Image (cartoon, rainbow, N blue to C red):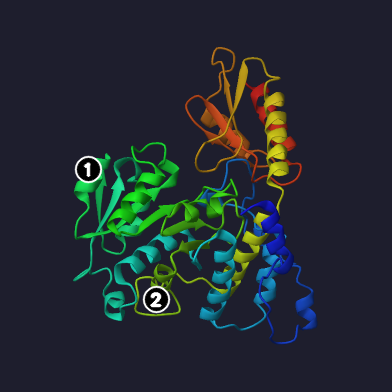
Amino acid sequence: MKRRDLLRYLSVAPLGAGLTVSGMPVLAEEKESALKKDYIKELGLRSFINAAGTYTAMTASLMYPEVMEAINAVSKSYIMLDEVQDKVGERIAQICKAEAATVTAGCWSAMVLGMAGVLTGTDPKKIAALPRLDGMKSEVIVQKSHNSGYVHALTNTGVRIIEIETREELENAIGESTAMLWFLNAHANLGKLTHQEWVAAGKNHAIPVMIDIAADVPPVENLWRFNEMGFDLVCISGGKALRGPQSAGILMGRKDLIKAARMSAPPRGGTIGRGMKVNKEEIVGMLAALEKYISMDHDKEWTSWMNQVEHISAVAKKRAGVHTEIVVPPLANHTPTLQIQWEQEQLKLKPADLQLALRNGSPSIEVLSNEKGISLTVFMLRDGEYKMVAKRILEELNKSA
């Protein structure tokens, strides 16, 4: 989808809530929506500047104002859950060039529900039986380098993981019990088989192929790239760079498989996905986040990130013995990342101690540390925070003898 096509789409699609909501009249007190209680202060919670990235433990990202507006607007009306999923799913599918889509309780949930749909189709007896796989296919093939902890989302449905490394091993592993081929995009450069080879194998054997792209936006093109490539199911997190609700995600792909996946999702009970509830606010909030994200000037945003990283780098290097490098991970969290290291002979400072000092300082700042130094990214920073990050890093570096 080219930028002009996106803008043409947005010209006819409402930005924000994405749905026309009618309901009870808004009360006067509801118009004053500003939260007067400071729960962070009242509960004694530590808030911080997030220079680490979109980690779940750090509550990922901050939602766009448009997302909160959509959430607040929808919260004032009752809507049938399946109806809002239908309408939002149609809109998301249109944006992402998929046959169909549904909002899930995160990327993990997207994988569980997608796997369930592959196994059961729309057969009520099979849906109720999961994770017991009597009479169903039971194996998922993955490349050995892709076999990370995330496969537990798939094994929740009862399937068994089969590891392979080469194309010959893949062909030998495919059999009557093979339910699906799974690909972890974050490890794409670690495996011996490419995206295209993986998809081709699935097509040749009429086996669905799923890809996990949880943190693989940016670039924006990844929202539709893997659908166009031929993956049958694509799973993505909604609360990372898309800055939707952290507990939301998207499952998109073949229409028949999305329909089957939803048969295991709320509001239906007695299913493996009953606990993966997504409320109407999160569903519409996810759409609002997606609409906001595709409307942005991503080139301008990238330039801003680079300028901020370069500023922090220049400030840190004012301390003798410090050297920096700007890197861009090719896969997952594809944003400018600054690595700061130093000569131990000149600075008797352990990276973990610098990380802790930044965390315990004012303002509190989160970065990552390793054996050689610290690393940080700026794409989750708010306006002006990069200057505070630079200042505090230099202060702590200057304290070290």
Crowding at label 2, few (<14), some or many (≥20) Cα neighbours within 10 Å? Answer: many
Q: In this view, does 183 lie to the left or right of 38?
A: left
Residue closest to the eye, 299 or 349 = 299
Foreground: 278 or 385? 278
- Left or right relative to 144: residue 251: right
Taking the view exactly as shown, the residue that stands out farthest to the bottom is 24
Residue 263 disc label: 2
Task: Answer with the quarter of the image where residue 180 lies.
Answer: bottom left
- In which image quadrant can residue 383 be found? top right
Location of the N terminus by quadrant is: bottom right
298 vs 343, nearest the viewer? 298
State yes or no: discs 1 and 2 in contact (Cβ < 8 Å): no
Is 354 drawn above or below residue 86 in the view shown?
above
Disc 2 residue type? Met
Residue 169: give its label. 1
Secondary structure of residue under mark 2: loop
Side of 388 relative to 246 (left or right): right
Which residue sits at x=31%, y=62%? 156
What amino acid is found at the position of numbered circle 1 in the picture?
Glu
Visible residue check, residue 112: yes
Horizontally, residue 140 falls left or right of residue 324, namely left
Residue 315 in the image: state x and y as whole percent: 72, 25
Q: Which residue is drawn at 72% across and 30% down?
A: 311
Q: How crowded is mark 1: few (under 14 residues within 10 Å), some or many (20 or more)?
A: few
Q: Residue at x 68, y 46 (%)?
A: 298
Residue visible at 47% across and 26% down? 371
> Of the residues tagged 1 and 2, which is closer to the observer?
1
Image location of residue 176, percent across then percent down: 19, 60
Is residue 38 at least partly visible in the picture?
no
